[in-house]
Amino acid sequence: MILEVINRHFTVGQKIPSVYLRVLSDRTATCHLLNSTGKDTGIVKEKTLTPEEFERLKAQLDRPDLRKVKRRYDLTHSVFDSWMEWDISVPHADRLQDITVADFSPSPTRGSSQPYPDALVMVGCSISMLRDEVCGDERDYRRSNCEKVLLGK
């Protein structure tokens, strides 16, 4: 495994975990579909990444500045009744890096308005876009912001 993202849906006193995205060293990417209440449906979708997609993701995961990000990023905006957190695990040769991000929401512009360091924005947006390619259910606002971030706009 080169990347695992466990999603935790927090709602009405519940914490519902699911496999948001997992990428294996054989280039297989999998995700578990969620129902409208955030529970895992048991349906697993899979895609084999092209060698180029896989190498691009590995390069982002191997960035030296990713190793320096904080272990936890809290909510950057108000929530009414529910939110999701990603528990991101990246195995490096010398250690397993764990990062928790509450309701990942990158700003489409870089600079002081961006709540995360560049390395985490790139990895988070790669997770978001890959999840959408495999499962087709990524949130519209995150997909739109990540498209702008990844295109450098």
Image: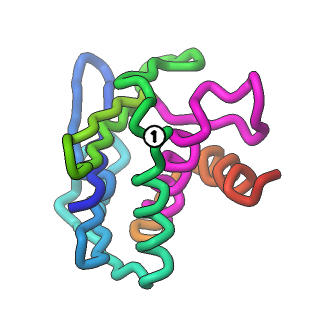
Tell me the quarter of the picture where residue 152 sits.
Answer: bottom right
Q: Is residue 135 above or below residue 74?
A: below
Which residue is drawn at the image coordinates 49% and 80% (left, top)?
52
User: At numbered mark 1, what does the secondary structure look like: helix, strand or loop?
Assistant: helix
Which residue is drawn at the image coordinates 74% and 59% (left, top)?
151
Q: Is residue 146 above or below residue 121?
A: below
Q: Is residue 87 above or below residue 146?
A: above
Left or right relative to 5: residue 147: right
Q: Nearer the viewer, residue 127 or 110?
A: 110
Q: Disc 1 residue type?
A: Leu
Q: Is residue 36 magenta?
A: no
Quarter of the image for the N terminus: give it: bottom left
Task: Pinpoint residue 30: horizontal percent, then vertical percent.
Answer: 28, 67
Left or right relative to 53: residue 5: left
Give the total number of marks visible in the rendering: 1
Which residue is drawn at the image coordinates 29% and 47% (left, top)?
90
Which residue is drawn at the image coordinates 62% and 51% (left, top)?
140
Task: Pinpoint residue 100: horizontal percent, then vertical percent.
Answer: 35, 30
Q: Which residue is mark 1?
A: 66
Q: What range of the chain is rendered magenta?
A: 103-132
